Image (cartoon, coloured by chain):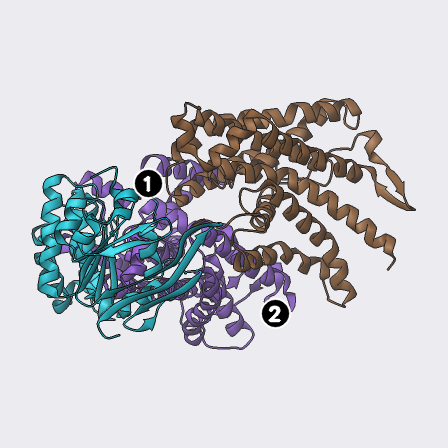
Amino acid sequence: MGNARNTEAPSGTAGWLVGAVVVVALFALPLILSQLGRTGEYWIWVTTEMLIMALFAMSLNLILGYGGMVSFGHAAFFGVGAYTVALLMKKAGAPLWLALALAPVTAAIAAAIIGWFCVRLIGLYFAILTLAFGQLLYMVVFQWYTFTGGDDGIHGIPKPEILTPIAYYFLCLVLFLICFLAMRMIVNSSFGLTIRTIRENMERAKFIGVNVRRFQWYNFILAGAFAGLAGGLLCELNRFAQTEFLHWSKSAEPILASLVGGMYSLVGPAIGSTVLIFLKIIVQQAHPSLVETWAIFLGLILLAVVLFAPGGLVGLYQRLTGKSET
Amino acid sequence: MADHVLQIEGLSKSFEGSQVFNNISFSVDKGELSSIIGPNGAGKTTLFNLMTGYHVPDSGRVLFMGKNIAGRQPYDIVRLGIARAFQRTNIFPRMSVLENLLSTVITKNGGNLNVVTPSAKLKSAHERSYEILESVGLADVAHRQSGTLAHGNQKRLDIAVALALEPQLLLLDEPTAGMSPEERWQTVELVQRLWEDLKITMLFIEHDMDIVFKISQKVRVLCYRTLLAEGTPAEISSNEQVIEAYLGEEV
Amino acid sequence: MSVQFYLFLLVNGLSLGMLLFIIASGLTLVFGVLRVINFAHGSLYMIGAFLAYSLSLLLTGGSLFSFFVMLLVVPPLIAVIGFILEYTLFRRIYRAEHLLQLLLTYALVLILDDLVRVIWGGDPRNVARPDFLAGSVNFFGMALPSYNVFILFVGPAIAIGLWLMLFRTRAGNLMRATVSYPDTLGALGVNVSWVMTSTFMLGCWLAGLGGVLMSSFANIDLGIGMEKIIECFAVVVIGGLGSVGGALLGSLIIGVGITWLPVLLASFGVQEASRWALVFPYAMMALVLIVRPWGLFGKPER
């Protein structure tokens, strides 16, 4: 009966308890960090980034882990969200709330257009087409100086007066939690179940009456929208948008996070993303010369996960505690 | 017209130049339990694939309840009322047995765009799923991960998934393939019982002649790219062409 | 603009395409036999280019001797690296999901690219062309760089060599058979994993060769691996994954397209035409995938 777990999100009292503790800790964190002066400010910035990147990783996992669709162009929607915020705030003078509200909308529109073509392909071909579209968008942003600022990016995005780093942390935390609950709802819903049937066995899904392409498309759009919000939030945090946000190496980040954290759970990618950012900082602080070799560390971690723990951290945890993977 | 659930009219299909069917026609009566036999490579599964939208015929029509469905999408045909179980087990392996059914019931009810209600809380869908699992005898393993079931039970699950679609025509592709003799007869009894209880039309592919002749009302023989013969078990077993072409070696 | 100018561009485009073909044919061969898209192919090519650079410092750069030493030494070295990678890593993932395969090769990109940075640093480098290829040849009144013309001969030679090997030798037969019937071959007593290792080494040898040739073609820096692997993706997607003939066609389309488009766009009055032309490989790749996902030369998979 160990493998009887229907929901892939943490369930049961233990899950709720851990969740509650984590949420309380996340709310209490800035109160502690704010006592630590410069270091504290730095860590508030870092944890805000962690929340945003965790959201980005979770958004990809809607299609990757739950949908079984390997996208190498997810950064496109992250970037569209970021540039939406940058352009609206810098060029149109829009308020932050409006810009942040529109970021997922524009990202969803981009995902709808790109996804419409991509879901016609499966497997490796799907992955390559997402890569091609992602890079296409990257190139357009890169070249279109007059609109996007090209490789200079857009800098000096206005910051509302009241938005101290701590306030922004709380804003991101609340949005993260809302998105987390929304995604949890989605993956546990009938829609989520349908998406999983497609991942498990696409041909059979067709023969139970699922219009596979349509559902993959909807899922692609949803994932794009969440990524767009993440991109918008990061843009405001950094107060700039740059072409790197759309580059395919950015698309790889949430994939790595999902792999390291564990793809078949909702929190896995968030954990993976946080662990990777944390490790990066540790490595860099251990010795300045190690900054250059972070990619080697990352590559070695990745190799180890691929070869020895394809279920990621969550998979390892489940193996250790005797719960099997769903 | 009314008493034919399915009519195949002049169906032809080739793959990469080699012809699988040449101008096949037959019809299936409403409420019939019939079988398709034929040597390996006669295209029995391909015929199912053509009926369910997996392949598009080169020419000819597939009429289901009088409507041409040739070339339609599989999910479309399923909704019209044709369901199938597969020769090689075809389930959702990393989902529980219950979830296999639940997702099918939800899809059948058109509720799979619901992103709000947890699927675990859909009471009527659960009840329906259990009902079907009971009818095929899988209720006590409902919470097992389906990929870990024994082969015979996976095939039953495959049939259960097809049943959950409440089809008017159920296609079973070698429902007893790979089973032990004992399991085979259990499955045959199951198929016959389901047919009697649900009063649906069933068409199955089978290799085991004992099974074919025991339960089918009508037998169709596919051979040499055409429908070689059609008739009651008694007619088929005494048909000289069939004996020569197919049964000769075995019977 | 004169016809001669366009011809000049055509020759340059073709030689760029031929270089691309040498690299991309390795990628597509490896995919064909191993069913793995090797992201690290670009990194191996880059290592080849930087090894050529180091060798040219050791030997007297610019001499014919050092050029031939580079051509003889570097590609086999890359093949040896390939052997190590295949034997220790790739072998373990042939039966894994696509995603794990892609991520393994991506991990190698991260590691190899950073190793190149650590060893050679981030400055752009170039390798002097050997004297006899440093000048230009006169061709119908055009002064064509002799090095480009040289590559115009090397590319087809490699293409013919690959064709002969694939279709006229036992090794090639085995490779092609492995593509279609890996299990049957194994049952027939063929050492399939050896065929795979050799194919992988051949692919790496081609990457290394491309690296050596590129080191004297243009400046090399840390970005060339990433840049080339994406171009190679475009090439193999256009031609059809796994098809060497397709890779040849795809390379020429991309090579000629990249050189011609800026001029063409500029003649229509497009600003910053040379920058916009860089979109071309991605646009082609997306277009082919949408219209004919299996590529111009490939076969649809079912």
Closest to the observer, B183 or C293: B183
Expressed as whole percent of the image width and height from the top left, the position of residue B162 reads: 21, 59
Query: From what the image shows, is residue A294 above or below residue C64?
Result: below
The residue at the point 11 percent across, 56 percent down is: B192
Q: Secondary structure at mark 2?
A: helix
Residue displayed at 57% across by 59% down: C287
Q: Which chain is purple?
A: A
Q: Which mark is residue C111?
A: none
N-term mark: 2 or 1: 2
Helix, strand or loop for disc 1: loop
Disc 1 marks a residue whose amino acid type is: Pro
The amino acid pointed to by label 2 is Phe
Chain ID for brown: C
* Residue A107 located left or right of residue C169: left
Task: Give the quarter of the image for residue A303.
Answer: top left
From what the image shows, is residue B198 above or below residue C43? Answer: below
Picture quarter containing residue C152?
top right
Q: Residue furthest right?
A: C141
Q: Nearer the viewer, residue B186 or C166?
A: B186
Palette colour of chain B: cyan
Q: Residues within 10 Å of mark 1 (few under 14, many from 20)?
A: many
Which residue in the structure is indicated by mark 2? A147
Q: Is residue A21 visible?
A: no
Which of these two is toward me, A133 or A19? A133
Task: Tell me the CA gap for discs 2 and 1.
Answer: 42 Å
Residue B197 picture location, percent across and down: 8, 63
Residue wearing tag 1:
A310
Q: Position of residue A28 (x, y in %)?
A: 26, 58
